[in-house]
Amino acid sequence: MARTVLQGLAWPSMAAPRVFVSSTAYDLGHARGQLRSAILALSYEPVLSEYADILYDPRDNAQASCLKELASCDAMVLIVGSRFGSVANPSALAQIDDGLLAAFEAGGTISAEDASRVSITQIELLKAVQDGLPVFAFVEERVLHDHATYVANREKSFADEIDFASISQPEFARYIFTFLDFLEARVVNNAIFPFSRIEDIETTLKRQWASLFQRLLTESRQSNQRTHRVDTLSEQLEDLKVAILSSMGDTTARDVARSTIQFRLLIDIVSSLNVSDLRGAVEQGISWEDLLERAGVEEILETPADEGSTQRVTRVVLRIADDGLLLGQMSTARFGRLADEWAAFVALPPSQRMAVFDGVTGSDVGLGPRFVKTSRYAYDHFSETVYAVTPKKTPDPVYGDEEPF
């Protein structure tokens, strides 16, 4: 077989992760240069302010240009050393959402009378969090040791009088340490890696990024396997439905079979609500509101969407009469459609409705509980993270085009 040798061809550049490196430059300049070389060696694209990696728009200031560049990056490497760095200017602060800045202030990092004590490095971190970038934070070991001393003594009157050997600007020690408090207090993406040499950062990043790549491959493979199993099961169920319906010569039997397929999931969900005399409620054909009242539901709540999620999907939570919770395994949007499905179910002829209900509840094979009862303790635990919502009523959906459970 003839071999074709290509020489002198300019191949188009391939996409590579853009890694923004954020740190003070005065004390960490050498480390930044060495880290830039290490990132380039991985064929990633480093983004550092002192190199020609950032577009400095002449219509804007340098700090704002750095923050705008973050929007095109895929990850941030944050390095915290002995210095506080340059104070952020108002235009940089203006790029941070008020809610995130308020959370930053609430952590004690800055106060209303001392709002100028925010460094550009800290603002870069807030912008990365706001944009949903993964942050790999590294802190000098000496600074971490002194931070532990600060945490142990910060409530004491002499806390601000302690000289910390790791901090080259003593007047900024409190702001550096409370910044570390903010990093550790985040719910997700809050890992902090200690380092004493730049090689420690290089080794950690290589291991972390290699592990992320391996997890990506594993999750992709598992997702494909799950999709294949679901597709196969769906095809088998469709074949089974056709076989069952075609074998029924009686019209009523076919109607019951179709309704059983249509309302099986609804009945499974309702059965997990612990409605008193559910069979009687079905027989009477009561309304959805009355059904929830029989289940003791006093308030419909929802859990906040996961931080950093690109799509806001919340889970429904029902507060019941004894101040316990029924935790739902479905989105709030899916729960909002149950009222219409229940109305369609109770509109069936009574004999057909009861045949469907008895057939589903009498089956040994269920689709699993959709609500799980919790204790009063769980209600107290969740009461600060869930909030009341108005039940939404939407038109009956086209099946298969709805949020996952």
Image: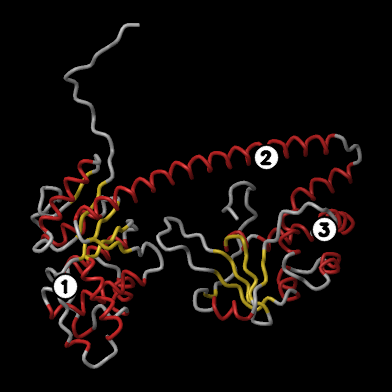
Percent position of residue 380, x then y: 56, 81
Residue 136 sits above or below residue 145 on the image: above
Q: Quadrant of the C terminus?
A: bottom right
- Can the viewer see residue 354 in this picture? yes
Around disc 2, counting alpha carbons within 10 Å, would you say few (fewer than 14), some (14 to 19), or many (20 or more)?
few
Left-right relation of 239 to 337: right
Residue 306 sits above or below residue 208 on the image: below
Percent position of residue 49, x then y: 13, 55
Q: Which residue is mark 3?
A: 361
Q: What label sits on residue 234 in the rendered view? A: 2
Name the residue type under label 3: Thr
**Tag in front: 3 or 1:** 1
| Separation of marks 1 and 2 at Cα, in angstroms | 62 Å
- Of residues 225 and 300, which is closer to you in this image? 225
Snapshot colouring: secondary structure
Could you tell me which residue is drawn at 18 percent across and 51 percent down?
35
Circle 2 — which element? helix
Q: Quadrant of the N terminus?
A: top left
Q: Quadrant of residue 201?
A: bottom left
Name the residue type under label 1: Ser
Name the residue type under label 2: Ser
Name the N-terminal-most of marks 3 and 1.
Answer: 1
| Separation of marks 3 and 2 at Cα, in angstroms | 22 Å
Q: Which residue is mark 1?
A: 166
Could you tell me which residue is drawn at 21 percent across and 77 percent down?
175
